[in-house]
Image (tube, coloured by chain):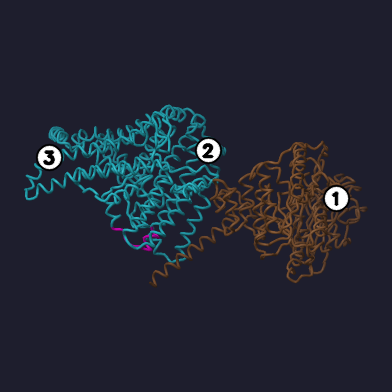
Chain colours: A cyan, B brown
């Protein structure tokens, strides 16, 4: 009732809103007042359910609880199979145990497949429903044929759950027998909407061993949240105004404006998604939970493969652990690779072994991001770039040596980083208009309309962002670049600030908060954009 | 334990400092338009005001509580805000009754014409932003009127932060809204076509919301023993803010309102079409036809003052030591008002009207004028007559190229060039008390300058330069230039 009352008055819990700040402040207060670990876990669970109900409605809450029950059942069934195995194999040697495991693993596989079918069935149904333009509904009672209920953050928790089930199947972890602990982890509110895709083994362990209140840790968490708000509200939402205008109607823009729009789009996405991660990880840090990092200065990457090891790390890690590695570690694949290594060498073997799994991984990554053909092409675009990079690596190494290019100099590294950045920009252009036809138009405009004077005749400032907004965006990007550079050099910025005298420290904190309040793009009058990655 | 306490205090101090700074930043960013609720209302102690006025901008302009104090000893406040609706009036009155227990509430019936609870979100901001967050009535009002946008009314920075691009010097200055006990003053003397008195549309129905809140207001006043009086202000001609069609509609609306109020025995002073009965003239008393200017407001306030003082047994507090600060406020408001009015007047005629008023009523201003450049033939006899209102003795329209300096004090001419024997250039130096005035005038325009105690004023434009010096403070209250136009001249004020 209270939630409905507040929702009716425009108060939502999107991570970048005042509603979330107030919710989180109240949550944290109650969380720290409670001393006993079990009560704190109870507070988190209540917080999770309220948050999810508030954000997704009753229907989404039902779906996520149903999902948790499916996962619990699947995990418990597999866990009991392996318990039986443990009991029956006590006293056996390792070799005997391995032989003995086969039939138990087969039984466990049945439960795994059943659970995964159910789990991914929901996800595929929703993705396919979107592709078929089924109307979306929020209530289970409205759920009929041709309508889809889209629970918030379903892609994230589905993947996290699948990883957890596969880990149990592979006996990397044991099943969580306490349902409420499992529900606590699956619905963990800072991570449920936009990830990071959690490793539940680590999360469950941390949730069971919640540390006490720590002033420094809470301060650090809040600093990280402020940094996230800065990235989201000052940079991302500002740049998104310009790029949104360009890609909504690319036919009206000059080539140079499209390039700027593409760059703005890429930077906005980075500031948006990584800003959200800062808020999420910072909020978790306040509670004493360490979530996996999802970004590591991606625009400092020199190759496409390195870029994806720095961008959306948990998604890449998930595909690597649960799709790529199982594919290349199959005995038949290993055997074939071994044969090629003997005949053609290690590089050829690596190429032969990795190419197909990489293309599959990137096709799935594309589908994870969106179900349209543009996302399929986007996924394959990255897949081919990475495969080609791998194939051509020796050639480029020779070429660099032939021309005597000093590859370790900062200048050459900058060129490689710039190249990788523009590969990312092109990738963004593939999906920015929402269709491949749109992308074709973007490319046509890029080469056919060279109205360079738009950079000088003030018309640049007529597409949603005026000159002052551009200045603020540039200032924000400069700050972002400096911070990323310092992180790249392994500098602990929060620690450095914390070591300063109180007056200086407070000036930094207060200045940052006021800067965001004044220059942030937010408020009811503004058509509040949600985080870009919450749609997945 | 000591460490925990230290950190707790540190966190509380940080939050307090943060909220203070957010408050200051919000003030700078907030809308400073005149249509907002006056800032000082909540600074007065409880039970201060005997009479509360509320209504839209017409009320803000028409009712001058300081004049009511000066003429009748009535302590009142004007809670008018731009486009205020009856629903907004209801909450303002409800809070005013809790704070001041006024004997009388006087409301503008002009709000009735709105069919909505609130005309726009911005208009609700004009009213609610000034209300303290601790006010229960504010929360009640927001729940009722703010709809889905409640957060932006709790924290106005939510809305106003986008104003950072349009901040000006005035946004950083305190009290730049020009309210005096809630009222504002218009100084333009506008003119427009006369309104036709068509028959009243008696079929007009009061909108559901207006009727609902009027009845609530009546119940509220009756339950608290507060007298309720309603009124409308005179509309004098057709202008930008009132068309003939709107005028006819309002006449119908006020007819219906009168019927409704009469059924509840609530008196209604409907002077919407009856400005002439109060001695008002469309050429002198209205700024835009619908809003009274300072001269019209004086007449209307005087009328309302007479009416309420004779019927509602309101106490004359002028001798009441408790209200001594009101006399100080009156003196301060007078001191500020002339300079403020002068600085906001852009019409040639209005400016010299105000100079004339200042000369006649306050006798504390020295006015210095100096011609710059060749203005032969620029002034008609009518123009010259307007300039002579300030107290000069020679008509500038009669002669050809000449320099001209005039220094006027308390209606007397301290110095005036003899333009019957024209000079191309002249210089005058005068010491009045502590004030040193140096003026030069030249037909070439190169050397024209007015200096007051060594500082140059109104230096960068041609034609007639004017400097108004406050003798009491020695400060320059206004400096301006008369800019010549083809059909009409105007006054410009340097920043």
Whole-percent x, y for residue A404 in the image:
28, 41
Determine crowd level at label 1: few under 14, some 14-19, many 20+ residues with C-alpha closer than 10 A: some
The residue tagged 2 is A455
Q: Residues within 10 Å of mark 2 (few under 14, many from 20)?
A: few
Image quarter hosting the C terminus of chain A: top left
Provide the chain ID for the residue under circle 2. Answer: A
Question: Element type at marker 1?
Answer: helix
Residue tagged 3: A102
The stretch of residues the image draws in magenta is A209-220
On whether residue A180 falls in the magenta region, the answer is no
Q: Residue furthest right?
A: B420
Q: Is residue A367 above or below residue B234?
A: above
**Quarter-wise, where is residue A129 in the image?**
top left
Of the numbered discs 2 and 3, the one sitting upstream in the chain is 3
Tag 3's secondary structure? helix
Q: Chain of mark 1?
A: B
**Magenta stretch contains residue A219:** yes
- Judged left or right of residue A211, residue B188 is right
Quadrant of the image occupied by residue A422: top left
Disc 2 versus disc 3: distance between alpha carbons? 68 Å
Give how far across and how far down residue A156 sits, in percent: 34, 42
Numbered disc in front, either 2 or 3: 3
> Does A207 appear above or below A300?
below
For the question of whether residue B461 can be seen, the reply is no
Residue A132 is labelled as none
């Amino acid at each position: 009732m209270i939630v409905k009352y507040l929702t009716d008055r425009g108060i939502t819990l999107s991570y970048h809103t005042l509603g979330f700040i107030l919710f989180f402040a109240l949550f944290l207060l109650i969380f720290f007042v409670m001393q006993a670990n079990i009560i704190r876990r109870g507070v988190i669970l209540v917080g999770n359910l309220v948050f999810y109900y508030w954000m997704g409605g009753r229907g989404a809450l039902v779906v996520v609880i149903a999902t948790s029950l499916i996962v619990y059942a699947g995990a418990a069934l597999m866990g009991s199979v392996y318990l039986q195995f443990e009991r029956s194999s006590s006293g056996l040697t390792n070799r005997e145990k391995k032989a003995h495991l086969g039939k138990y693993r087969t039984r466990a596989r049945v439960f795994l497949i059943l659970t995964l079918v159910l789990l991914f069935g929901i996800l595929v149904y929703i993705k396919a429903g979107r592709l078929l333009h089924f109307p979306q509904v929020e209530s289970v009672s409205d759920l009929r044929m041709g309508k889809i209920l889209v629970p918030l953050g379903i892609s994230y928790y589905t993947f996290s759950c699948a990883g957890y089930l596969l880990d149990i199947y592979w006996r990397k972890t044991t099943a969580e027998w306490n349902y409420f602990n499992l529900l606590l982890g699956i619905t963990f509110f800072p991570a449920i909407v936009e990830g990071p895709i959690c490793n539940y083994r680590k999360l469950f362990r941390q949730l069971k061993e919640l540390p006490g209140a720590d002033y420094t840790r809470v301060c650090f968490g809040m600093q990280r949240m402020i940094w996230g708000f800065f990235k989201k509200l000052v940079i991302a939402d500002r740049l998104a105004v310009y790029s949104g205008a360009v890609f909504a109607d690319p036919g009206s823009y000059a080539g140079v404006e499209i390039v700027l729009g593409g760059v703005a789009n890429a930077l906005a996405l980075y500031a948006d998604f990584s800003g959200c991660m800062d808020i999420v990880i910072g909020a978790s840090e306040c509670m004493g939970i360490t979530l996996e990092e999802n970004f590591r200065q991606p625009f400092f990457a020199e190759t496409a493969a390195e870029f994806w090891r720095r961008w959306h790390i948990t998604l890449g890690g998930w595909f690597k652990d649960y799709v790529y590695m199982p594919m290349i570690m199959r005995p038949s694949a290993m055997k074939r690779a071994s044969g090629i290594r003997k005949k053609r060498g290690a590089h050829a073997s690596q190429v032969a072994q990795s190419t197909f799994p990489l293309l599959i991984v990137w096709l799935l990554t594309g589908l994870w991001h969106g179900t349209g053909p543009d996302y399929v092409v986007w996924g394959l675009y990255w897949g081919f770039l990475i495969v080609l990079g791998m194939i051509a690596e020796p050639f480029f190494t020779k070429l660099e040596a032939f021309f005597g290019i000093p590859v370790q100099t900062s200048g050459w590294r900058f060129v490689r980083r710039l190249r990788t950045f523009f590969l990312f920009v092109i990738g963004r252009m593939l999906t920015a208009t929402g269709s491949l036809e749109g992308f074709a138009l973007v490319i046509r405009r890029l080469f056919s309309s060279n109205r360079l004077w738009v950079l000088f005749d003030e018309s640049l400032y007529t597409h949603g962002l005026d000159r002052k907004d551009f200045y603020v965006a540039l200032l924000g990007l400069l700050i972002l670049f400096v911070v990323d550079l310092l992180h790249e050099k392994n500098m602990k910025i929060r620690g450095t600030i914390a070591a300063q005298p109180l007056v200086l420290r407070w000036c930094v904190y207060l200045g940052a908060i006021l800067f965001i309040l004044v220059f942030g793009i937010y408020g009811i009058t503004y058509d509040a954009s949600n985080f870009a990655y919450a749609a997945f | 334990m000591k460490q925990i306490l230290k950190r707790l205090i540190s966190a509380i101090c940080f939050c307090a400092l943060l909220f203070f700074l957010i408050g200051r930043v919000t003030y700078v960013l907030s809308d400073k338009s005149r249509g907002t609720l006056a800032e000082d209302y909540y600074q007065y102690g409880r039970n201060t005001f005997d009479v509360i006025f509320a209504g839209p901008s017409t009320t803000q302009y028409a009712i001058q509580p300081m004049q009511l104090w000066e003429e009748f000893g009535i302590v009142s406040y004007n809670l008018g805000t731009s486009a205020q609706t009856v629903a907004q009036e209801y909450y303002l009155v409800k809070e005013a009754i809790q704070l001041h227990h006024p004997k009388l509430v006087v409301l503008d019936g002009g709000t009735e014409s709105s069919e909505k609870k609130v005309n726009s979100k911005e208009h609700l901001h004009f009213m609610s932003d000034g209300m303290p967050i601790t006010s229960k009535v504010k929360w009640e009002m927001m729940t009722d009127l703010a709809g889905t946008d409640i957060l932006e009314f709790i924290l106005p920075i939510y809305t106003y932060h986008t104003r950072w691009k349009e901040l000006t010097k005035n946004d950083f200055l305190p009290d730049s809204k020009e309210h005096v006990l809630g009222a504002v003053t218009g100084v333009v003397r506008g003119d427009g076509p006369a309104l036709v008195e068509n028959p009243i549309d008696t079929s007009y129905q009061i909108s559901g919301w207006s009727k609902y809140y009027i009845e609530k207001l009546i119940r509220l006043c009756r339950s608290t023993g507060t007298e309720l009086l309603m009124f409308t202000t005179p509309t004098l001609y057709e202008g930008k803010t009132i068309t003939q069609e709107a005028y006819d509609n309002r006449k119908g609306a006020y007819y219906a309102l009168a019927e409704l109020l009469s059924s509840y025995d609530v008196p209604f002073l409907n002077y919407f079409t009856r400005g002439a009965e109060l001695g008002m003239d469309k050429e002198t008393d209205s700024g835009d036809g619908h809003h009274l200017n300072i001269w019209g407001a004086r007449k209307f306030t005087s009328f309302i003052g007479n009416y309420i003082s004779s019927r509602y047994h309101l106490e004359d507090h002028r001798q009441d030591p408790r209200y001594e600060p009101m006399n100080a406020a009156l003196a301060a408001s007078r001191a500020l008002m002339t300079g403020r009015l002068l600085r906001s007047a852009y019409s040639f005629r209005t400016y010299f009207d105000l100079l004339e008023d200042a000369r006649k009523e306050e006798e504390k201003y020295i006015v210095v004028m100096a011609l710059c450049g060749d203005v032969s033939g620029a002034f008609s006899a009518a123009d010259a007559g307007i300039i002579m209102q300030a107290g000069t003795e020679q008509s500038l329209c009669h002669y050809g190229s000449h320099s001209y300096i005039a220094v006027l004090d308390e209606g007397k001419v301290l110095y005036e060039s003899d333009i019957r024997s024209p000079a191309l250039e002249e210089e005058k130096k005068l010491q009045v008390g502590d004030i040193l005035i140096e003026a030069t005038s030249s037909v070439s325009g190169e050397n024209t300058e007015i200096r007051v105690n060594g500082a140059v004023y109104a230096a960068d434009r041609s034609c007639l330069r004017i400097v108004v010096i406050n003798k009491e403070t020695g400060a320059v209250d206004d400096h301006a230039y008369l800019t010549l136009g083809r059909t009409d001249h105007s006054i410009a004020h340097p920043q």
